[in-house]
Amino acid sequence: MKNLSRLLMMIILFGMGSHLFTFNVGASEVSSAKVITENYKEAFLKYPQVTGLKNSEGQKKINGVLHEHIQSSYKAYLKLMEEMENYKKGVDCKKQAPICEYSYSTYYDVKYNQDGRVSILFYDATYSGGAHGLEGVTTYNFNLKTGKKYSLDDLVSDQSKYIDITDYVRKYMREHQEIFFDEGILKDFLVNKDTQFYFTDEGIDLIFQQYEVAPYAVGHPTISIPSSLFE
């Protein structure tokens, strides 16, 4: 009888263990994504694609959005090269060679990839003469289970909280004048649904373009927003 009881207990425990193991594997499939690098027509035009998601339709949505971005980048690159050729016709490039060679490149950075969400920053860098080039950043935040692209409206629980977030950001900028423009320049600054962001462990980080809220040398400044401000 004791042997039979032990056998039944082993069967029950084994069944529970198998169930738990299966559950954990299923959860991990949507917890994070594998992000790979692809080139689009040129080696310097790099873009991300996600793989290994359980929901193939969701994965297709995400990759479609990222692919559309690199297609737009390629069109911008072709336009820049056309402008360069036209510029060369009116300038003695033998004497001013550096300013006659324009360039375009893309790269990306995965800022967050856990808890069923991924944040990817897509950078487009250009040089068209002058002291330095310019670099634009576009943020993409996705739900890995559904493929949905998040906007700030999806996170901010009440529209009135945009006022609280704006006040928080302005206060941060005032306290860090060594980084940001002075308050007179930023008097019309507002955080809204189009403000770029990416996920963090504590909430989100807002990220800005060069010259948007700070001098060029600062690059793309970020400001951390705790989840308590927008949930």
Image (spheres, helix red, strand yellow):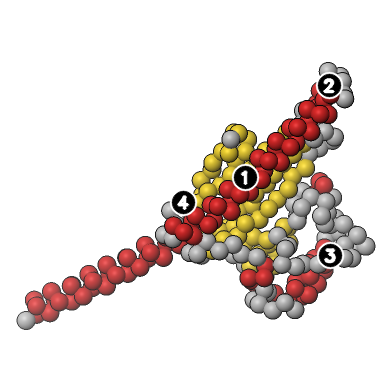
- Please give the name of the residue rendered at 83% of the width and 51% of the height, measured from the top-left corner: 211
- In what element is the residue under mark 1? helix
Where's residue 82, x and y in %? 75, 32
Q: CA distance from mark 4 to mark 3?
A: 38 Å
Q: Give the farthest residue toward the right.
A: 184
Q: CA distance from mark 1 to mark 4?
A: 17 Å
Tag nearer the camera, 2 or 3: 2
Q: Return the residue nearer the eye: 50 or 34.
A: 50
Q: CA distance from mark 1 to mark 3?
A: 29 Å
Mark 1 or mark 2: name the one nearer the start of the chain.
Answer: 1
Query: Height in image: 42 above or below 69?
Result: above
Tag nearer the camera, 1 or 4: 1
Q: Is residue 118 visible?
A: yes
Which amino acid, mark 1? Answer: Ile
Which amino acid, mark 4? Answer: Thr
Count of labels in the image: 4
Q: Which residue is mark 1?
A: 70
Tag nearer the camera, 1 or 3: 1
Mark 1 or mark 4: name the one nearer the start of the chain.
Answer: 4
- In what element is the residue under mark 4? strand
Mark 4 or mark 3: name the one nearer the start of the chain.
Answer: 4
Q: Which residue is mark 3?
A: 189
Q: CA distance from mark 2 to mark 3?
A: 42 Å
- Please give the name of the residue rendered at 60% of the width and 34% of the height, measured from the top-left corner: 42
Q: Could you classify mark 2 by the number of other residues whose Cα lies within 10 Å: few (under 14), some (14-19), or many (20 or more)?
A: some
Q: Could you classify mark 3 by the number of other residues whose Cα lies within 10 Å: few (under 14), some (14-19), or many (20 or more)?
A: some
Mark 1 or mark 3: name the one nearer the start of the chain.
Answer: 1
Q: Is residue 110 visible?
A: no
Query: Height in image: 196 above or below 168?
Result: above
Where's residue 31, x and y in %? 47, 62
Mark 2 or mark 3: name the one nearer the start of the chain.
Answer: 2
